[in-house]
Image (cartoon, grey):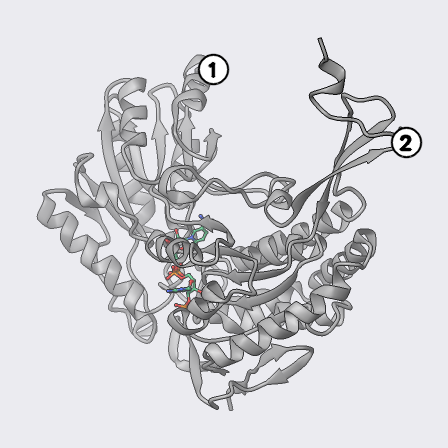
């Protein structure tokens, strides 16, 4: 029988107040139910926010190194459970085991980074313009953080947000994606087992329209950290304006890998296979466009098609599988509709382009890895995020033209250039409009201790990862201590003519 999951509010596992539930199924075998989850509403969010607000008053006073100790225990527990978490994640959202192990590892790295940050959280001491006066700026907690996450990195993305939020002294109300609630529940179990007190982390399962909206609109939620589609991100920003809360948005991408004629072709091929079809193309940083210099275009396309046709589709739990299913039926249909759009636009389908018909794939949301050539910069398949195993190949003649095509998108998350020419590499680093640029590596491969995020409609200027995310989850408090014993007037007493 499928496991019954619950919300976690104020240290207790509870059902939705309405008693309603929803099911979560394995995308590789949709007849397998992973579990039933509470279909919560605004009243459950209300309760979670009330408890998080109360818990904030004690959690904010726990010394940051002590909060860091809890983060270290979280990391240790994740190490101990790495394999079982990875298996659960593969069953829940489909990506292959090597990748779900990597997803958990990113959470572990983030926990240990947060643990060490507990003994840093550096502020500044700055000289005063007046004598016998001491100036400093320090980081203080903000309050209740609403955390809303997508399904494609069910462990890594929640940890990127929740661990720095907690380390900085905030409390959390967490709404995970409806497609990956079991992995999110495991994360909350681990946080609790590591010693996070009741009310400090709360999880409320349910739909974006109900639970997500209620979190964003709640006047007692001080900040919202959201990762998901650009469409929903815009709605969140509009809604948050009513209470002027702090919002961090990590949104869509239309990432490109560009290959110059002097590049190592084998390396570029391995890069694009991993970048375009890893996680079934369902990464915000997935390689969705391949820009090939005209001199090597035909050769690389031939090499690519051969390899794409030999990628093995299947259940990500099975040894030897390269590409898992799409996360759900609607995502599979989106992919199919973009393939039809590509054909109508006049691009040439050179690999994939169909739902597989093999009997062992018949009960999953699989789609064949797909490649289009003759794609032009104005085609929709060159411009819009597809979020599936579809690669659009475009041709360019010069570095400048390649960069122009690369930048011709509303998004700006990741980018990649394969070249052995150092001048071209640095020109590309300077001119590509993206938050991340890789040289001789694919568009995917972020490391937990580096800033992560994008420009243009990929976000609103914040970064996750590394030291940068701590700016979002803490507030600067500026302090002046005057020990002169007299009234000293800044800008005036020092400058009297
Ligand atoms: P999504 O549909 O925008 O959903 C993301 C989260 O928002 C889910 O928890 C969803 O809940 C919730 N949500 C939906 N509507 C909402 C609303 N009106 N108010 C508040 N919350 C709402 O995105 P997705 O399909 O899960 O993820 C794919 C997208 O995420 C892609 O565009 C991808 O590029 C982007 N992404 C970006 C990054 C990055 O760092 N830049 C990383 C990963 C993914 P339900 O699940 O219940 O609908």
Crowdedness of circle 2 by 10 Å Cα count: few (<14), some, many (20+)?
A: few
Residue labelled 2 has its Cβ within 8 Å of some atom of ligand 1: no
Q: In the image, what residue occupies the spot 54% across and 62% down?
A: 146
**Which image quadrant for residue 477?**
top right
Give the left or right position of residue 439, taking residue 187 as reference. Answer: left
**In the image, residue 443 lies at what x, y percent?**
43, 39
Give the left or right position of residue 360, taking residue 194 as reference. Answer: left
Q: In the image, what residue occupies the spot 77% across and 34% down?
A: 136
Label disc, if present, on residue 316 of the rendered structure: none
Q: CA distance from mark 1 to mark 2?
A: 60 Å
Q: Please, is residue 36 above or below residue 48 in the view?
A: below
Q: Is residue 317 visible?
A: no
Label disc, if present, on residue 485 of the rendered structure: 2
- Residue pointed to by mark 1: 422
Callout in the foreground (1, 2): 2
Secondary structure of the residue carrying tag 1 is: helix
Q: Please, is residue 43 above or below residue 92 in the view?
A: below
**In the image, residue 148 lies at what x, y percent?**
49, 62
Crowdedness of circle 1 by 10 Å Cα count: few (<14), some, many (20+)?
A: few
Q: Nearer the viewer, residue 138 or 457?
A: 138
Of the 4 image quadrants, the one containing the C terminus is top right
**In the image, residue 487 lies at what x, y percent?**
82, 30
Q: Nearer the viewer, residue 117 or 289?
A: 117
Q: Nearer the viewer, residue 482 or 464?
A: 482
Give the left or right position of residue 491, taking residue 428 as reference. Answer: right
The answer to whether the residues at label 1 and label 2 have Cβ atoms under 8 Å apart is no
């Amino acid at each position: 029988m499928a496991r019954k999951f619950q919300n976690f509010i104020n240290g207790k596992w509870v059902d939705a107040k309405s008693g309603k539930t929803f099911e979560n199924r394995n995308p590789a075998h949709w007849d397998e139910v992973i579990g039933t989850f509470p279909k919560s509403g605004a009243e459950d969010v209300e309760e979670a926010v009330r408890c998080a607000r109360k818990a904030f008053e004690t959690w904010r006073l726990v010394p940051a190194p002590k909060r860091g100790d809890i983060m270290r225990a979280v990391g240790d527990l994740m190490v101990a459970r790495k394999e079982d978490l990875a298996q659960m994640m593969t069953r829940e959202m489909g990506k292959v085991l090597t990748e779900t192990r990597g997803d958990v590892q990113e959470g572990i790295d983030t926990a240990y980074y947060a643990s060490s940050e507990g003994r840093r959280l550096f502020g500044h001491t700055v000289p005063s313009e007046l004598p016998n006066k001491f100036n400093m700026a320090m980081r203080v907690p903000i309050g209740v953080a609403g955390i809303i996450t997508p399904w494609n990195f069910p462990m890594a993305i929640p940890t990127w947000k929740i661990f720095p939020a907690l380390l900085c002294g905030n409390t959390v109300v967490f709404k995970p994606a409806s497609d990956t609630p079991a992995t999110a529940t495991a994360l909350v179990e681990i946080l609790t087992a590591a010693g996070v007190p009741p009310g400090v982390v709360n999880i409320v399962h349910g739909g974006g329209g109900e639970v997500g909206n209620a979190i964003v609109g709640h006047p007692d939620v001080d900040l919202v950290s959201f990762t998901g589609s650009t469409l929903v991100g815009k709605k969140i920003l509009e809604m948050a304006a009513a209470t002027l809360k702090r919002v961090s948005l990590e949104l869509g991408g239309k990432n490109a890998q560009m290959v110059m004629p002097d590049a190592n072709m084998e390396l570029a091929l391995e890069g694009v296979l991993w970048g375009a079809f890893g996680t079934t193309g369902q990464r915000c940083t997935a390689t969705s466009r391949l820009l090939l210099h005209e001199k090597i275009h035909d050769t690389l396309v031939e090499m690519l098609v051969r390899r794409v046709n030999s990628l093995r589709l299947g259940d990500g739990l099975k040894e030897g599988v390269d590409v898992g299913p799409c996360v759900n039926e609607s995502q599979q249909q989106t992919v199919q509709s973009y393939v039809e759009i590509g054909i109508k636009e006049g691009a040439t389908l050179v690999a994939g382009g169909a739902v597989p018909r093999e009997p062992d794939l018949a009960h999953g949301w699989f789609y064949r890895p797909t490649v289009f050539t003759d794609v032009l910069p104005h085609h929709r398949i060159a411009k819009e995020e597809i979020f599936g195993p579809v690669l659009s190949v475009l041709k360019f003649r010069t570095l400048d033209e390649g960069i122009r095509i690369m930048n011709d998108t509303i998004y700006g998350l990741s980018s990649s250039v394969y070249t052995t020419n150092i001048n071209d590499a640095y020109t590309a680093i300077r001119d590509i409009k993206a938050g991340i640029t890789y040289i001789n590596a694919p568009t995917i491969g972020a490391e937990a201790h580096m800033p992560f995020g994008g420009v243009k409609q990929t976000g609103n200027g914040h970064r996750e990862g590394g030291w940068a995310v701590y700016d979002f989850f803490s507030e600067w408090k500026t302090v002046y201590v005057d020990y002169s014993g007299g009234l000293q007037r800044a800008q005036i007493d020092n400058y009297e003519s």
